[in-house]
Image: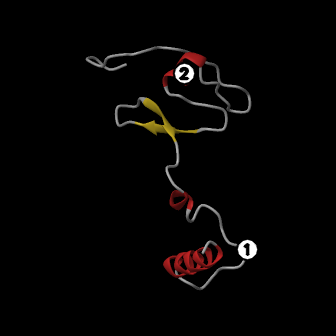
């Protein structure tokens, strides 16, 4: 830890043969992490590693994370507008 940095909590864990690390329960509670949540690892310029919760805030955050089986030539906004019109027709 660099001089002048305040530590809120220190905990240790061990790296498994598969490269897995268990986040200690105290840290999981402080970060409100639950099974299935993602975390991001940030390597700072100082060489420290920062771990932060990585929670998606909306469905739009997922856009582009999966490749379509067959590429759709339409623009995303065109597809979204089509789905909205379809949904409006079902719920009127």
Q: Which residue is drawn at 50% across and 27% down?
A: 31
Q: In this view, does 12 lie above or below 81?
A: above
At 35% from the left and 31% from the top, the residue drawn is 46
Rounded to the nearest angstrom, the CA distance separating label 1 from label 2 is 39 Å
91 versus 8 height, above or below: below
Front residue of 17/35: it is 35
Q: Residue at x 49, y 77 (%)?
A: 77
**Residue highlighted by disc 2:** 29
| Residue drawn at (44%, 31%) of the image | 50
First in sequence, mark 1 or 2: give its number. Answer: 2
Of badges 1 and 2, nearer the viewer stands 2
Pointer 1 with pointer 2, Cβ within 8 A: no
Residue 11, position as x, y percentages in the image:
52, 14
Label 2 crowd (10 A; few <14 / some 14-19 / many >=20): few
Residue at which label 1 appears: 69
Quadrant where the N terminus is found in the figure: top left
Quadrant assignment for the C terminus: bottom right
| Quarter of the figure with residue 71 | bottom right
Residue at the limit of the structure toward the front, as seen here:
92
């Amino acid at each position: 830890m660099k001089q002048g940095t305040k530590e809120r909590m220190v905990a240790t864990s061990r790296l498994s043969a598969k490269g897995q690390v268990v986040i200690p329960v105290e840290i999981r509670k402080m970060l409100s992490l639950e099974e299935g949540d993602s975390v991001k690892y940030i390597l700072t310029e100082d060489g420290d590693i920062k771990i932060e919760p990585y929670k998606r805030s909306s469905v739009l955050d997922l856009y582009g994370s999966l490749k379509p089986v067959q590429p759709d030539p339409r623009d995303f906004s065109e597809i979204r507008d089509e789905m909205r019109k379809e949904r409006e027709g079902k719920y009127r």
